[in-house]
Image (cartoon, rainbow, N blue to C red):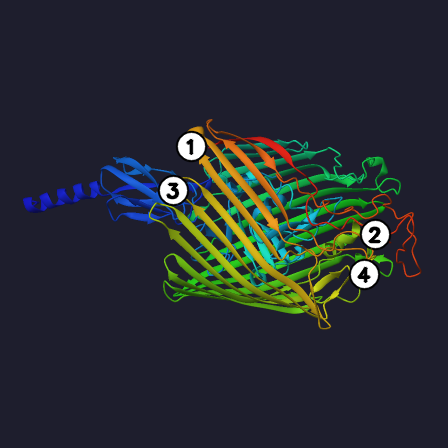
């Protein structure tokens, strides 16, 4: 058979053309050891490019042979270019981008889906490890002190346990998640925030305002989602350790290994020790609780067909902490000779994600926690067990302009202790409940400028019946750099026995629950404005401003005022309101100066019988800042961080109590110097609490009756009220609950970081 020469030439040309344009470049874009989703990757000077997927992976096809410049960019991050020489069919190129701003960070907490922070209709704040390294801490609880609108609140001068306040609301209103799992609640809200290895944290996502329509009870005031690193993209080895002049020692270690082609493994450990009895305020009680704790974490990722998700993680946490009179030793534990608060905590956590092998995107997430508490507060023992099991199935489905999410969840709560809270007619009656839930969410993107999100959740709690929580979120993109969001919805919260009465365990006050507590309900409106400004000299300014109004019914409040010997809990016969405004400003200047500023003004009050009062332990204003600058020739980074809080109403023990009814304006400020001139190493050091501020300043004492912690010399009347005597002129009882800030004064610290990629 003859072949026409014309067709032969055409065939050869087609083959040559195909070989020239059939090449491929693929790779991964990461930032700080984590995948960077939706980053732009393109061949410079051409229209050939793509975006990375959720795992930071990209692939560009049909590239001609020869030399090219390939560019990876992401708004708010440094742009990186690489020269490549395309000769083979497939070439691998990886990028590491460095953060300049978090406004384009991919978030998942607001909608349970990965989406750019600028695109989500729900305002979400993102904080990465670089933010927390500016003021290194030994636990997540302390790390949050420089987040605007978030305040770690100490609840006891002696044991130094606490909870997280968001926009002035008490700790029980804040939900803390790890990788989206509700495993930090109840007992662990008070004790379990310590010991999460900082080396394993990829970022924290924070929502301020109700999120009950997606996450259920406890997410009334806000939500903190601690997201751990993906093993495949984490550094091979990280070590971070520091010591302070107070004698604190902290060690954080992370290790990543690839086990075969389909399994990646991440291990982390945190160890913290403080064993110095320090009493700078001379009340014969420890200023800082002595602590010895260890936390072990591991996470496994498994590669599956079609890149379906499958990961497992677990954590073990143990802590031995005590505070009290300086003479206390373990032999006095539980006795009434020397006062001490000794707490042993043992905790297991398991969690995982499994994407079902369907064409549809169906994800099953699950977690289980087992928490054992063995504590004594003076001569009062507190023994408790808590178990929480959680499973959730979600179906992500897109239909035209509708991005739908269907979900069903089941939560099992078990709680038992040795107090009257779980006793009935002289027999043990643990609190045990299973709560099924279903929810639906519909995100409608009308066009590039307008997006509407509608959601509804239904929970059934046998103690309280049917609970509905709808929500609405609207996003208006005024321009490419201006976003306006309006959110409205409802929230609910059921009483948590431990969290409600914990404050009373550490003192002489009795807990009184006057009625069967009903679930709280809240109604919230939030407006948020986000703006990016790029200047001609390559500087960047990001603005994030919000205003909110939340109205509560059936609010569960601790009453410290009616009887100074009691904490009375009941549903508010009236209403409560939380309203305020907040703003964050992020600035990155061309000369290397970075500034983060935050401020919050709020009013949290309750109205009952026509009388409005401020909520106790709630500041009316607060501010945070961080200023960073790198002296490049010296390889020296300087970080100056701090916070400031306005006056709070404090719990007094009666009209004769000489301590101040309101706290002063107070501030904690820190400075740190970091040298990164060595390969893989950083050396850092600085001073914490530069102003040497402690809450005893201006007060005659902080702990009431520290000289008589068992009230052996207090005279009571027939109603149980303390009487004024020459030995007790202020009619006080022992009480360490007058606390609003840390007792730890100025101190130096020095540390070393090592990272092997």
Marks 1 and 3 in Cβ contact (< 8 Å): no
Q: Secondary structure at mark 2?
A: loop
Residue located at (50% from left, 42% from top): 627
Examine the rendering and report whether any part of residue 455 can be seen. Answer: no
Q: From the viewer's perspective, tell me whether residue 364 is left or right of residue 663.
A: left
Residue 700 vs residue 299, the one in the foreground: 700
- State the image coordinates of residue 580 (x, y, percent, origin top left): 57, 62
Residue identifier under label 2: 508
Q: Which callout, 2 or 3, points at the residue further toward the start of the chain? A: 2
Q: Is the residue 107 above or below the residue 32 in the image? A: below
Q: Nearer the viewer, mark 1 or mark 4?
A: 1
N-terminal label among 1 and 3: 3
Choose mark 2 or mark 3, whichever is in front: 3
Q: Nearer the viewer, mark 4 or mark 3?
A: 3
Looking at the image, tell me whether mark 4 or mark 3 is earlier in sequence order.
4
- Asked whether 531 or 7 is in front, the reply is 531
């Amino acid at each position: 058979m003859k072949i026409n020469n014309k067709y032969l030439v055409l065939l050869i040309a087609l083959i040559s053309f195909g070989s020239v344009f059939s090449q491929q470049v693929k790779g991964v874009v990461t930032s700080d050891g984590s995948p960077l989703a939706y980053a732009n990757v393109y061949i410079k000077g051409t229209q050939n490019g793509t975006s990375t997927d959720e795992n930071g992976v990209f692939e560009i096809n049909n590239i001609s042979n020869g030399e090219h410049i390939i560019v990876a960019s992401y708004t708010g991050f440094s742009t990186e270019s690489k020269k490549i020489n395309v000769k083979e069919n497939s070439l691998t190129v990886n990028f590491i981008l460095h953060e300049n701003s978090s406004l384009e960070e991919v978030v998942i907490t607001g909608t349970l889906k990965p989406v750019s922070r600028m695109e989500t209709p729900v305002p979400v704040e993102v904080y990465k490890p670089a933010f927390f390294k500016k003021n290194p801490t030994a636990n997540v609880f302390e790390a949050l002190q420089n987040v605007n609108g978030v305040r770690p609140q100490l609840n006891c001068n002696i044991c130094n346990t606490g909870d997280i306040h968001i926009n002035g609301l008490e700790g029980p209103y804040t939900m803390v998640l790890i990788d989206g799992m509700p495993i930090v609640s109840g007992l662990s809200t008070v004790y379990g925030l310590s010991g999460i290895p900082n080396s394993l944290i990829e970022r924290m996502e924070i929502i301020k305002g109700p999120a009950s329509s997606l996450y259920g009870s406890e997410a009334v005031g806000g939500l903190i989602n601690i997201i751990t690193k993906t093993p495949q993209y984490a550094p091979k080895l990280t070590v971070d350790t520091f010591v302070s002049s107070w004698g604190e020692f902290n060690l954080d270690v992370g290790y990543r290994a690839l086990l075969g082609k389909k399994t990646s493994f991440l291990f982390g450990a945190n160890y913290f020790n403080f064993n110095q009895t320090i009493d700078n305020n001379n009340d014969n009680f420890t200023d800082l609780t002595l602590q010895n704790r260890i936390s072990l974490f591991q996470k496994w990722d498994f590669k599956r067909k079609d890149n379906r998700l499958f990961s497992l993680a677990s954590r073990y946490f143990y802590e031995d902490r005590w505070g009290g009179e300086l003479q206390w030793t373990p032999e006095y534990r539980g006795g009434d000779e020397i006062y001490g608060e000794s707490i042993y905590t043992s905790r297991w956590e398991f969690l995982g994600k499994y994407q079902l092998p369907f064409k549809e995107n169906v994800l099953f997430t699950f977690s289980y926690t087992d928490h054992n508490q063995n504590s004594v507060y003076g001569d009062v023992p507190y023994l408790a067990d808590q178990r929480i099991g959680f499973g959730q199935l979600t179906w992500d489905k897109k239909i035209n302009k509708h991005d739908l999410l269907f979900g069903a969840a089941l939560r099992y709560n078990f709680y038992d202790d040795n107090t009257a809270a779980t006793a009935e007619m002289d027999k043990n009656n643990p609190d045990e409940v299973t709560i099924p839930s279903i929810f639906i969410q519909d995100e409608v993107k009308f066009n590039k400028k307008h997006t509407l999100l509608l959601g509804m959740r239904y929970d059934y709690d046998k103690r309280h019946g049917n609970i509905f929580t709808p929500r609405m979120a609207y996003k208006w993109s005024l321009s490419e750099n201006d976003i306006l969001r309006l959110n409205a919805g409802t929230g609910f919260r059921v009483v948590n026995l431990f969290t409600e009465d914990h404050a009373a365990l550490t003192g002489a006050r009795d807990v009184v629950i006057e009625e069967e507590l009903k679930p709280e309900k809240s109604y919230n409106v939030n407006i948020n404005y986000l703006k990016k400004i790029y200047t001609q000299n390559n500087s960047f300014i990001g603005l994030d401003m919000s205003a909110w109004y939340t109205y509560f019914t059936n609010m569960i409040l601790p009453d410290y005022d009616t009887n100074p010997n009691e904490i009375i809990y009941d549903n508010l016969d009236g209403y409560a309101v939380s309203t305020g405004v907040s703003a964050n400003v992020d600035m990155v200047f061309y000369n290397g100066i970075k500034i983060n500023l935050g401020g919050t003004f709020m009013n949290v009050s309750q109205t009952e019988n026509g009388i409005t009062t401020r909520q106790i332990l709630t500041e009316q204003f607060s501010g945070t800042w961080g200023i960073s600058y790198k002296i490049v020739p010296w390889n020296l980074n300087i970080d100056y961080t701090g916070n400031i809080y306005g006056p709070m109403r404090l719990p007094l023990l009666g009209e004769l109590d000489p301590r101040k009814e309101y706290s002063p304006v107070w501030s904690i400020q820190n400075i740190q110097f970091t040298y990164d001139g060595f390969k893989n190493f950083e050396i850092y050091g600085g001073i914490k609490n530069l102003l040497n501020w402690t809450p005893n300043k201006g007060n005659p004492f902080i702990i009431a009756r520290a000289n008589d912690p068992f009230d052996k010399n207090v005279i009571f009347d027939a109603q149980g009220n303390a009487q004024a005597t020459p030995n007790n002129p202020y009619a006080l009882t022992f009480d360490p609950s007058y606390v609003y800030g840390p007792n730890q004064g100025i101190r130096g610290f020095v540390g070393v970081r090592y990272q092997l990629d």
